[in-house]
């Protein structure tokens, strides 16, 4: 039930961010979580966010196509000066709680702060898969479309 709005894999188009996210989880994610892993659904939801907002074009710590965990640490030039903790690029092999802009509490995503990051696109309904999300900051990006009704259920 991770695909929202009554879609099925059979009805998704090949260029749908949900297809890219599922493909990444199955074939390219270095963590290779199994179907029973508690973090699989939130990792999928975040992957849909990455593909929906073209993370390769992000200003700070987007996916640059390099999944080697040794090179996935964000460089100092990627950060605002006030960030003093180590964060990693999106879609890298580290725990998603260590990705730039993601805040977790005991391994569960509670915050997504990606303001001023050159995000372009629509907010995917799958963001509601982050069921404990309390903070969502996407200001000063190029986000268009309607706010998914699924966010109201959080």
Image (tube, rainbow, N blue to C red):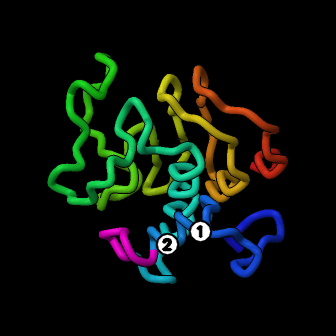
What SS does tag 1 mark?
Answer: helix
Residue 31 within the segment the image draws in magenta: yes
Q: Compare residues 86 and 126 and report the one nearer the observer.
A: 126
Residue 104 within the segment the image draws in magenta: no
The answer to whether residue 7 is visible is yes
Q: Residue furthest top?
A: 81
Residue 71 image position (x, y, % from top left): 17, 50
Left or right placement of residue 4 versus residue 33 in this view: right
Please tell me how crowded label 2 is: few (under 14), some (14-19), or many (20+) other residues with Cα within 10 Å: few
Placement of the N terminus among the 4 image quadrants: bottom right
Q: Report the residue at 49% width, 62% height from top.
A: 43
Residue 19 image position (x, y, % from top left): 59, 68
Q: Report the residue at 56% width, 43% height from top.
A: 53
Give, as a single range, the part of the protein colored magenta.
26-32
Label 2 vs label 1: CA separation? Answer: 6 Å
Q: Compare residues 11 and 135 and report the one nearer the observer.
A: 11
Q: Report the residue at 83% width, 70% height from top.
A: 6
What SS does tag 2 mark?
Answer: helix
Q: Residue furthest front?
A: 14
In the rendered image, the vertical position of residue 94 relative to residue 103, given as above or below? below
Q: Report the residue at 46% width, 48% height from top.
A: 105
Cβ–Cβ under 8 Å for marks 2 and 1: yes
Name the mark on residue 23.
2
In the rendered image, the vertical position of residue 102 relative to residue 30, given as above or below? above
The answer to whether residue 135 is visible is no
Give the labeled residue for mark 1.
19
User: In the figure, residue 29 lies in which quadrant?
Assistant: bottom left
Residue 58 image position (x, y, % from top left): 43, 35
């Amino acid at each position: 039930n991770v695909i929202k709005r009554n879609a099925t894999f059979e009805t998704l188009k090949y260029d749908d961010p949900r297809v890219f996210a599922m493909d990444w989880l199955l074939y390219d994610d270095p963590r290779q979580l199994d179907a029973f892993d508690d973090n699989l659904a939130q990792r999928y939801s975040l992957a849909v966010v990455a593909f929906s907002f073209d993370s390769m074009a992000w200003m700070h710590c987007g996916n640059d196509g390099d999944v080697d965990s040794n090179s996935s640490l964000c460089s100092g030039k990627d950060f605002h000066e006030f960030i003093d903790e180590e964060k990693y690029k999106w879609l890298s092999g580290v725990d998603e709680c260590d990705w730039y802009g993601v805040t977790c509490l005991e391994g569960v995503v509670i915050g997504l702060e990606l303001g001023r990051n050159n995000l372009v696109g629509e907010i995917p309904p799958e963001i509601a898969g982050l069921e404990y999300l309390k903070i969502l900051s996407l200001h000063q990006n190029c986000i268009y479309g309607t706010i998914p009704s699924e966010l109201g259920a959080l």
